[in-house]
Amino acid sequence: MDKKQMKKSFLASAVALAISPQILASTAETIYVVPTVGGYGFDGERQASTESMASIGLGYELTKSWATELVYSSLTANRDDLTNQDLDVDQIRLDALYSFAQQGRWQPFLIGGAGDSVFQYEGFKDNNETLVNLGAGVKYLFSDEFSIRSDVRGFQSLDENLTDYGANVSLQLNFGGNGASSGKNNNPLLVDDQPITKAMRTEPVVADADQDGVADANDQCLDTKVGVAVNNLGCDRDDDGDGIANYVDSCPDSKAGSIVDEVGCYIPLKEKVEMSLNVEFDNDSAQTRKDHLAEIARIADFMQKHPDANVMIEGHSDSVGASNYNKVLSDKRAHSILDTLATQFGIDVQRIKSMGYGEEKPIANNDTEEGRQKNRRVVAVLQAEVEKPAK
């Protein structure tokens, strides 16, 4: 099949789908077009430069998870050898796409298929190869009709045993608004992106006592105020997850899990609070142990509840060995706790400081093993100002 025959075959298939009344009647909401641009890299034995490739595809969604696509691609590259010949590549292939469950508006997928590729070197006879491809990607759904997706994949030639590769960015344009690729949230436990307000309600709702747009049968909060934005469970929206509804939240960007006042703002800072963390280390070691995690978690929990709190981590050692070495070792111990707070508990590293004191501040007698063990420690002194509870 030469390039002209390939293009004619693809166009004939696209036209056949477009004009068939039976197909359009049954699949009008599941046919889509996929224009694509990307980069195409060649196996080293082809001695060709990496170039951009343009593609056009016609897709049909069989189910919410499965779709098939007829794709035509074309590119022009140059040989990397001394000949510097032009290399024209045309592909026509049939791909299958498997979509995983949506995560909000993101949807990962696998894609693969097979087809015919024509490699035409300038001045030489066309070379036809059968290529199979396999890859993975992710799609972002803007609406029922429009989404953007990206994928990477490999192309294996069954005739020449060569492997090419490609990376693509595509637009997906659906014919219809209720197809399987709909960007709507199909999980009733997730909050809709668009709040429901009284002004938006254009149709009467049956059995909706609080008039929030959610039927009583599905409403988990039956006494919401009229006109207040609610989620699809009929409860006041709380976008920042601080437990304060949007309509009374004066600080809509507070961190989830933090302690806030009745209007959703961090509690005013009035009284200093100190917490101390004591963990001991093995001899000549700065390695954090598993039994440290419970104590470190206690500090992390307090810092998450009080986003304005900062912590100073002090590292200490026993008196065995050179004092300069002990100072370096104690600094490493302090930094290991800092690293655990940041990497395992997600505390912003800007809120943590560390310092090594070496053997300068013992809390026990260094003449005994028991005393030396107690001196091999890290102390975390955390300071924050919190509102003093009313008496």
Image (cartoon, rainbow, N blue to C red):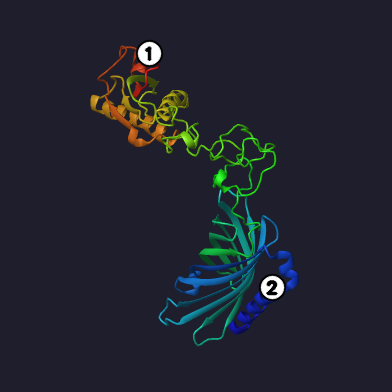
Left or right for 136, reference 78: right
Counting labels gives 2
Q: Secondary structure at mark 1?
A: helix
Q: Residue furthest bottom?
A: 123
Q: Position of residue 289 (x, y in %)?
A: 44, 27
Please name the amino acid that badge 2 sits on. Leu
Q: Residues within 10 Å of mark 1 (few under 14, many from 20)?
A: few
The CA distance from mark 1 to mark 2 is: 83 Å
Depth check, mark 1 against mark 2: the one in front is 2
Check the image and report above or below for 240 versus 172: above
Q: Within 10 Å of the Cα at label 2, are there few (<14), some (14-19), or many (20+) other Cα atoms? A: some
Where is residue 70 drawn, in percent x and y?
64, 70
Which residue is rendered at x = 58% and y = 80% of the image?
Answer: 127
When asked about the image quadrant of residue 173, the answer is: bottom right
Q: Secondary structure at mark 2?
A: helix
In the rendered image, the vertical position of residue 385 relative to residue 3, given as above or below: above
The circle drawn on residue 17 is 2
Pick the front one: 47 or 145 = 145
Which residue is found at the position 55% from the left and 62% from the top? 153
The residue labelled by disc 1 is: 370
Name the one closer to the observer, 25 or 11: 25
Residue 214 in the image: state x and y as whole percent. 64, 40
Q: In the depicted view, which residue is nearer to us: 90 or 377?
A: 90
Considering the image in quadrants, where does the C terminus appear?
top left
Q: Quadrant of residue 310?
A: top left
Q: Nearer the viewer, residue 272 or 296?
A: 272
Image position of 174 with respect to 261: above or below: below
Residue 196 seen in the current view: no
Please tell me which residue is depicted at 42% across the width and 38% down the height of the picture. Answer: 253
Q: Is residue 178 visible?
A: yes
